[in-house]
Image (cartoon, grey):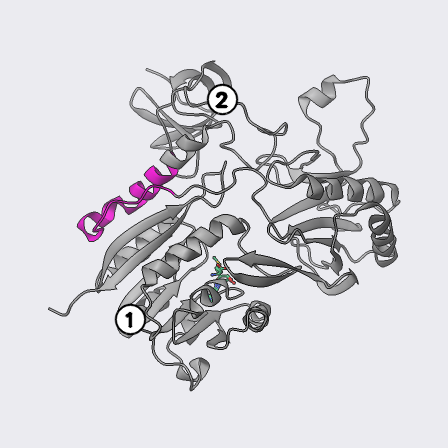
């Protein structure tokens, strides 16, 4: 009988991928989750955690490869925290993503009227992200290959890059990220070069002190515009150093359209800051989605894979089945992209969102596109969804609701309100099949779940988005 004690080494065959991305093997009937394993592989692995009904293990050696294994396109694969499925054939990634949606929705049984659709692939599988966040660190992590190159002297006291997989406190110098454009990577290189020589220290997450914290690059995939957002700590000389960095990039970084500096005074390791200073250009970029143009400022939310999001929004609009006569509510509207996408097909659209700056962006985007039948309301939906005062006099109750909540899904108050408001159709957009399944089960009290269409917005990761059409049941 195999022991599953921590530290035990075993050989096993990987059967499938679990929701979340880990490989699954059964050893003597006991489930073992394997980090970085693919179905079809035979591996030697070491148990790192033992629970009552399962164990977790790391792969030490691949003894037999998976038939679906491919050569990863990125040199940092395995070390980097992103792209964990880059060594799995893209077609298979889509197969497993669909299966995970099916598994999550399985318990809905007959409520689900049609099978889950085939996953719509991302138009691009590399260079698809329009936003990347890079972290500065005073402790540069070196790969075993770099350490082996003893003849090279590596400066370990400064890094600008991404986090090492599973380690929030380790950063490696990224040279070539395949999710980003070569132009954006050239900016990372130039910023690293300048800041390393600046004499000012990277921010330390242990001492909570230092200058350089984050570099965020946003890129309009259709417009080619690029925004550089430098986030520093509250450190003497930081402002002057960013001014000099701006001058340096103006001379050497031809790919930049605008540069913004902000200060993060908090201990939270988030790439956001206050006191935004626009040092170069308009302080925002524009992106095109369908026939709309969106203004994206340094800290506003925008879908990170715009080309795939365009397909998703188009399907959300199709599922809404609008004739031009409807009042549509766009719940969790962010900067209004879905509201604006459907505005031309509806009488009136009302967007609801908790972040005030996103609402300002939504109005700006409506004006930019000369859309005049949308209103946007700020507030926590669980409190404001039934509040006529927040809704305002010009907004009728909805014929159709489109809802796109964060990963946690909809609050029970929002579900309850939807069941009472009972629009004839609900289109649910979700980035988390598990919370989607929970919300659909609750809504099924009054709604048929007609269609589920998954979209891949994040190639090489286990993430999957879904658009679902729900139609109100006829009264018995
Ligand atoms: C997945 S995003 C969707 C944004 C938008 N539909 C889009 O496609 O760009 C979820 C949005 O819900 C907002 N949000 C989160 N919790 C909320 C709440 N309790 N009430 C209202 N909005 C909320 C977030 O700020 C975010 O903009």
Location of residue 207 in the rendering, given as x and y in whole percent from the top left corner: 75, 47
Location of residue 289 in the rendering, given as x and y in whole percent from the top left corner: 52, 57
Residue 42: within the magenta? Answer: no
Which numbered circle lies on residue 160?
A: none
Determine which quarter of the picture holds residue 116: top left
Q: How many residues crowd mark 1 within 10 Å: few (<14), some (14–19), many (20+)?
A: many
Task: Please report the residue visible at 75 percent of the width from the left and 36 percent of the height from the top.
Answer: 139
Q: Which residue is mark 1?
A: 423
Main secondary structure found in the magenta portion: helix
Q: Is residue 32 left or right of residue 188?
A: left
Quarter holding residue 424: bottom left
Give the residue displayed 67% in from the left and 21% down from the top: 144
What residue does disc 2 label?
59
Query: Could you give the CA–CA distance between mark 1 and mark 2, rounded to whole angstroms?
Result: 50 Å
Does ligand 1 reach within 8 Å of label 1's beta carbon? no
Near-viewer residue (449 or 309): 309
Range drawn in magenta = 96-119
Closer to the eye: label 1 or 2: 1
Q: Secondary structure at mark 2?
A: strand
Residues 456 and 172: in front is: 456
């Amino acid at each position: 009988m195999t022991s599953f004690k921590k530290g035990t080494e075993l050989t096993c065959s990987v059967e499938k991928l679990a929701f979340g991305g880990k490989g699954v093997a059964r050893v003597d009937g006991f489930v073992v989750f394997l980090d970085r394993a693919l179905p079809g592989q035979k591996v030697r692995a070491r148990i790192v955690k033992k629970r009552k009904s399962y164990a977790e293990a790391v792969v030490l050696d691949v003894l037999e490869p998976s038939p679906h294994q491919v050569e990863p396109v990125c040199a940092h694969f395995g070390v980097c925290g992103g792209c964990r499925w880059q060594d799995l054939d893209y077609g298979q990634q889509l197969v497993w993503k669909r299966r995970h949606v099916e598994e999550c929705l399985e318990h809905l049984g007959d409520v689900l009227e049609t099978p889950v659709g085939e996953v719509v692939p991302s138009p691009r599988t590399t260079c698809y992200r329009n936003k990347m966040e890079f972290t500065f660190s005073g402790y540069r992590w070196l790969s075993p290959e770099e350490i082996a190159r003893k003849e090279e002297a590596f400066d370990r006291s400064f890094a600008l890059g991404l986090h090492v997989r599973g380690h929030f406190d380790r950063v490696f110098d990224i040279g070539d990220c395949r999710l980003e454009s070569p132009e954006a990577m050239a900016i990372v290189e130039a910023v690293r070069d300048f800041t390393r020589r600046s004499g000012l220290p990277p921010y330390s997450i242990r001492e909570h002190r230092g200058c350089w914290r984050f570099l965020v690059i946003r890129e309009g995939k259709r417009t080619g515009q690029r925004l550089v957002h430098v986030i520093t700590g509250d450190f003497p000389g930081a402002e002057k150093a960013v001014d000099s960095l701006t001058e340096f990039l103006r001379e050497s970084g031809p790919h930049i359209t605008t540069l913004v500096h902000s200060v993060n005074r908090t201990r939270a390791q988030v790439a956001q800051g206050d006191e935004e200073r626009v040092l170069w250009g308009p302080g925002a970029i524009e992106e095109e989605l369908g026939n709309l143009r969106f203004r994206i400022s340094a800290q506003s939310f925008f879908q990170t894979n715009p080309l795939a999001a365009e397909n998703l929004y188009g399907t959300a609009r199709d599922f809404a089945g609008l004739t031009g006569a409807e009042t549509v509510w766009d719940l969790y509207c962010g900067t209004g992209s879905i509201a604006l996408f459907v505005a031309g097909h509806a009488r009136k659209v009302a967007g609801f969102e908790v972040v005030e700056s996103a609402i300002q962006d939504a109005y700006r985007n409506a004006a930019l596109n000369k859309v005049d039948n949308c209103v946007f309301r700020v507030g926590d939906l669980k409190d404001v969804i039934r509040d006529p005062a927040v809704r305002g006099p010009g907004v009728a109750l909805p014929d159709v609701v489109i809802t796109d909540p964060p990963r946690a899904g909809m609050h029970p108050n929002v579900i309850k309100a939807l069941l009472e408001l009972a629009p004839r159709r609900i289109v649910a957009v979700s980035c988390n099949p598990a919370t989607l399944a929970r919300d659909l089960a609750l809504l099924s009290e009054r709604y048929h779940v007609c269609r589920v269409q998954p979209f891949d917005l994040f190639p090489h990761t286990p993430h999957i988005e879904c658009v679902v059409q729900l139609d109100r049941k006829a009264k018995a």
